Amino acid sequence: MRVLTYLAHRLLFVIPQLFGIILVSFLLVKSVPGDPAVLMLGPTATPAAIASLRKVLGLDQPLYVQFFIYVKNLLHGNLGTSWQTTRPVLDDLIQRFPATLELVTLSLLVAIVVGVTLGLYAATRPNGWIARFADLYGLSVGALPDFWFALVLIFVFYTMLGWAPAPLGRLDMIIIPPPSVTGALTIDTLLAGDLQAFGSGLSHLALPVLTLGLLNAGPILKMTQSTMEKMLESDFSRYEVLCGVPERLVTRHALRNALPSIVTIISVLYGFLIGGAVLVEIVFSWGGAGQYAVQGVLNSDIYPVLGFVLFSAIFSLIVYIVVDLIYVLLDPRISN
Amino acid sequence: MLAKLRLFARLALVRPRFAAGYVIVVVVTILAILAPVIAPFSPTEADSLSFLQPPSSAHVFGTDNVGMDIFSRAIYAPRIDLTIAILGTGLSALLGGSLGALVGYYSSGQGIRVWLSFALMRAADVLQAFPIFVFAIALVASLGQSIQTVVLAIAFVNAPIYLRLMRSQVLSIRSMRYVEASQVNGLSDFQTIIRHVIPNAMGPVLAQLSINVGWGIVLTAALSFIGAGVRAPTPEWGSMIAMGFQNVVTGQWWPSMFPGTMLAVTVFGFSLIGASIEVLADPAKRRLLLTDVRLRDIARAAKTAKRASLGQG
Amino acid sequence: MSDQFTRMKLGPSRRRFLQTVARAGGAAMLPASFGMGEAFAQGANDTLVIAAPATPQGLDIEFDVSLGSIDSLGALYEYMLGYEKIPDPNAPDAQREDTSVHADKPNNMALRGRLAEAWEVSPDGRKATFKLREGVVSNWGNPFTSKDVKWTWDRKFNAKGQGLFQTAVLGLTSPDQIKIEGDHAISFNLDKPSPILLKQQCNLANPIYDGTKCAAVGASDDPWAINFLKNDSAGFGPYRLSQLVRGQQAVFEARSDYWDTKPAMKRVIMREVPQSASRFSLLQGGAVDIAQFLQPREMEALKSEKNVAVDAVNASYMIWLELNAKIAPFDNIDVRRAVNLAIPRDEIIRTIYYGYADPQTAPMPYIYPMVDKSFFSYQYDLAKAKALLDKAGVGKGLSTTLSYNAGDPTQEPIALLIQTSLRQIGVELTLEKLPAGVFYENVTKRAKPMIFYLDSPWTPDPGYSLYLYFNSKSYVNYSNYNNPAVDKLITDGLATLDNSVRMPTYAEVQKTLMDEAPWGFIAYPKYTLARKANLKGFTYYSSNNLRFQDFTRS
């Protein structure tokens, strides 16, 4: 029951937050130069044609009216049309968002495995070489720009060794993609029973997932290590050790108490990476949503940008709510 | 002064990685300052006769696809990158930090201040929920490509971090005795904040600053990589990586790899500095560090004594 | 007649625009799944698979000049006339249109009748009568009659798109000037003689529609079939549209009831592959027959591949700098000349085009009749350039902005080379990178002092080309060039059919233009085709498009 009221509270906040996000992004995007009507009609358009299109798009109205129109359309599920793809933004995003999601989720899984494992080891054996390696890893990995690291991996594993496929998208061009169920190639290919496509998809995922996964393991590692250290030094852990509880159990209990912080950082990363994976998407020509939005900004195509911001904001908010719910479940003390 | 330096040297020997961080940053800064003197070629001169040449004695880092010398550009680049990152991060710390201090101080109490704090926090939420690249690119696209706008973009993107950091620091300090004491003594809110709260909150902020400068460099490079950073042909690590991007796939690695490596090493240096500040600022960790220093001194003293005694005997 | 050239130039601007956007976007617009299950048809000798930067946005030339669109047009539609074909001097396997002046041929041109079997131009040049071919049917089965030609030209007056320019360029003011003279005869009645009347019948922008089908399909609410023709075709060409999934692919099937030789390629699949690197690797791997619009260095890399051939032919493309005559310092003629003397054309062609271009030495395409390259006097000479700047009173140094298109990967390196060169004569350029959309806006608004432009006029005629860019009333005169004497010469040359008058007239125009340097002349990029070695038949058209019916496999 408490969970439900808590959920209700959070959801109530979501609406004004979303509204704020839409408002800010609308204003921001509107300030980017470039007349949408001119862009849609092309440089050979007559001034008369441009004027009439502006009227149709509502561009001759004052800004707040345009915002109103946009929100009204939003509520009807109309996110506008991209002049570059000439398709509704909603359709474009439904195609591209799963690509980003698949990439980010898999990368985060890798990051969690690497980060938590190393962090645990480093915390439980603070003088071992793993701890020192973990320290260095955490520091250095935070310094590497992801687009550069991706280039290094491409150079080593594709150009020199030829192990990885060319950084040209999610699948070999020759492979027919499976019918789209979830949008995630790994799932859809398995659902369709197409093992060749599955293999191709995995091989194309290897480098980008490695890039994002290894680089984002850093913060997770650091958080795991520092929180675990704190937990292991705290009273209850020492008491357990004094009582002769086996080390594995001590660690497990400490970990359970450290989980909230670790989950926090994972959730923050998750929300961040949806938009933050853009550079890797660009390097690997992934065709993801972040890339779509960036191209939108660069080419004064405003609706894709707004649509993407909306999608990623909603996604982040969902992630945060889920995480907070997990807290409530994990720790009965945290409920205010 | 000298004693401090000596202490610093001993600290460096105990934790070589921290020393490495400072050394890296100092070296890069020196390179940037001395670039006009050291650089064999002009960083913006395209010499198409020698385009895409691999590293050689004439061009230590090779040339890019319009014949500009990569070494010269790579050592000029930190001028732009460091300037933008430091200015941007500094601005964000100033902006976010001061707002954060206020918000933290007034987050409970009466009336309009509480509401303002609340609103500001929600505004920061909104800003942080924004995909940062889209935000930064849109800012640069609307304000025009220039160093100033990139600085602004970095400032805006990072401000919420400092806002939250300062706020949480202030919140925890606010309840401390000495703040109560100062208030009892009749100090105004403003004076209390300035004299007591902020100085005590600075430690983590400083550590964060250093790491953020490194991150600011990455963001600047990322913006230029996408094409929304400084304008061509300004030497800047990110735009150099972007210009050489296509060539990596066809085997000409040098236009992108050299600037990328310098970028990574520099940012790494800033991370190390940040880590060192973190240790120095936290009293418990500082004690540990100084203990190690003392242990090392004792060991050295023992060795000298042993050698002396052996020599005498 | 000059007053009527008020409409926009038809032309590849939007196509170019979308091409560069596609290049810029790379795979941004690459859909996550191809979905339709259409594999790259392997091994079928009569299937042509093309990796294109973009699928057609719309199939109606009236409103859409995008890349995929113009490549589709030549296959879906038929034209009244066409040029004879001759082998290309630079590419052994390729052919090209014969657009030269032939004093010994009728109308002084090497024309072939297509939908028009025979034609006659009155001695005063004001009336052209066409006898139309009988026995031709459209892809909807409707027989071809003069009604279709009439409907086509009526549409140009009414659809308010490119057609307005097509009519204005011929001096047509009313649909009544196109008269049906019989079921298979039609006449064009001009107020003044036009030397491009027959040439315009060959122009890709003037396909003939199946008027019967269009009228039936559009009924009363869309009498000009605008919605229909955007997504489908109704014409007399060798192919019909079999499938169009925008952003993914377009599929064309050869028609068995086509009036002329049936195409060897029975099926054509045009796949959208936005990144040139992807198209490159597809061709390299043998998955496609043609990889369009590769970058120069990619084409260089293909030369060593055994199963791939690259045809590079002289084309109607031009790339230049608009030097805005209304914005200082380019209002000064000596400054413009100085800039031209300092453009390192040979370097640009070698470094950036890898030789797939020729220096631009005339203000019109070098493959068009009556082009005169002898007036080019801007060989690279920095000393001369500096002297001219001194003369212009800016010898101490000058700074201005050069704007370029972020979406065109050749423009930034060219800009860098020009910047370095100009710096040596004391001109400091600030490079301004503009995203594709903003770039074109600035070009048409004539807002910048110095901005790139890449274009090609489709009609191989000096008057047409020179009018487009240099007549003061032309919408496409983006450099704000204004010389009344030149205006008059250009329009005079467009009012007579007599080549002995036109030639010296246009020589005079070119001489003046080269002297007054409204442009920073850079290069003539070649049209290149990267294809499988066993694919023959490539023919170059001045509208820079492919016609699928040309191709055969050896």
Image (cartoon, rainbow, N blue to C red):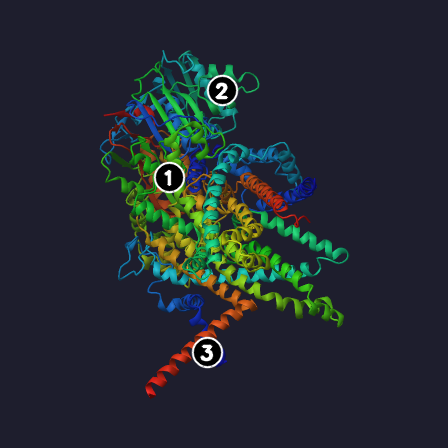
Vertically, is A143 above or below B186? Answer: above
For label 2, the residue is: C176
Q: Residues within 10 Å of mark 3 (few under 14, many from 20)?
A: few
In the picture, residue C546 is in which quadrant? top left
Q: Mark 2 is on which residue type?
A: Asp
For label 1, the residue is: A203
Residue C469 is left or right of residue B312, and the answer is right
Q: Chain of mark 3?
A: B
Q: Quadrant of the C terminus of chain B?
A: bottom left
Residue A240 is left or right of residue C393, and the answer is right
**Residue B160, percent across and down?**
60, 55
Residue A330 is left or right of residue C461, and the answer is right
- Label 1 with label 3: CB-CB less than 8 Å: no
Query: Toward the viewer: C455 or C487?
Result: C455
Q: Nearer the viewer, mark 1 or mark 2?
A: 1
**Residue B52, percent across and down?**
30, 52
Mark 2 falls on what kind of element? helix
State whether residue C459 appears in this view.
no
- Measure the alpha-carbon separation of dots 1 and 2: 65 Å
- Measure the alpha-carbon separation of dots 3 and 2: 99 Å
- Label 1 with label 2: CB-CB less than 8 Å: no
Mark 1 falls on what kind of element? helix
For label 3, the residue is: B6
- Label 3 with label 2: CB-CB less than 8 Å: no
State whether residue C38 appears in this view.
yes
Q: Nearer the viewer, mark 3 or mark 2?
A: 3
- Measure the alpha-carbon separation of dots 1 and 3: 54 Å
Mark 3 falls on what kind of element? helix
Residue C116 is left or right of residue B5, and the answer is left
**Residue B58, percent across and down?**
27, 61
**Residue A232, percent across and down?**
54, 58
Query: Toward the viewer: A169 or C521?
Result: A169
